Image (tube, rainbow, N blue to C red):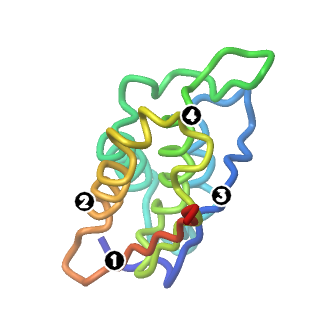
Amino acid sequence: MRLLCLQAYVTQSDDLIATLTVKEYLHYAADLRLPSSHALITRAEKREIVNNTIQQMGLQECANTHVGNWHLRGLSGGEKRRLSIALEILTRPRLLFLDEPTTGLDRYYYCRHTDQSILQDCRSVLHADEQHFCFECSHTKT
């Protein structure tokens, strides 16, 4: 896939609309963020990008689940984090900045999965003919 943007930034907090599903969120983001003028990317290509991103970020089992909030049951903290990252990597940025990607996740999940799996997923999605970089910013208590 051709490079669509130079950099992307994933914020520390997951500010997501609770009533949308993972698939709806990514489709809307693709329609808004991926170029469509002059047929640079066709609708079918956008669908393929969304479906590949869902699969590569490990969101296929919750693709039809609402994001949720305190009132509406939905995604877990890790799934919300993955969705936030997926929204930014739709454009396959050359540089991806992650501001504390483990914020809000419970200690078990953080220790067992996050450091390696989120960054591994980002790298696998961004892996292409060109070289891409993934930067993580985390604060630790000393």
Residue 72, horizontal then vertical, whole percent: 74, 16
* Residue 55 position (above or below residue 21): below
Crowding around mark 3 (Cα neighbors within 10 Å: few <14, some 14 to 19, many 20+) is some
Task: Residue under label 1, please give it.
Answer: 2
Q: Please give left or right for residue 22 compared with residue 122 in the image.
A: right
Crowding around mark 2 (Cα neighbors within 10 Å: few <14, some 14 to 19, many 20+) is few
Q: Upstream in the sequence, badge 2 or badge 4?
A: 4
Quadrant holding the N terminus:
bottom left
Q: Which of the two residues, 73 or 22, is positioned nearer the viewer here?
A: 73
**Foreground label between 2 and 4:** 4
* The quarter of the displayed image where residue 35 is located: bottom right
Could you give the CA–CA distance between mark 4 and mark 3, rounded to whole angstroms? 12 Å
Crowding around mark 1 (Cα neighbors within 10 Å: few <14, some 14 to 19, many 20+) is few
Task: Residue under label 3, please give it.
Answer: 12
Q: Are marks 2 and 4 in contact (CB under 8 Å)?
A: no
Q: Are marks 1 and 2 in contact (CB under 8 Å)?
A: no
The numbered disc on residue 124 is 2
Residue 79, horizontal then vertical, whole percent: 49, 35
The numbered disc on residue 77 is 4
Could you give the CA–CA distance between mark 2 and mark 4, rounded to whole angstroms? 21 Å
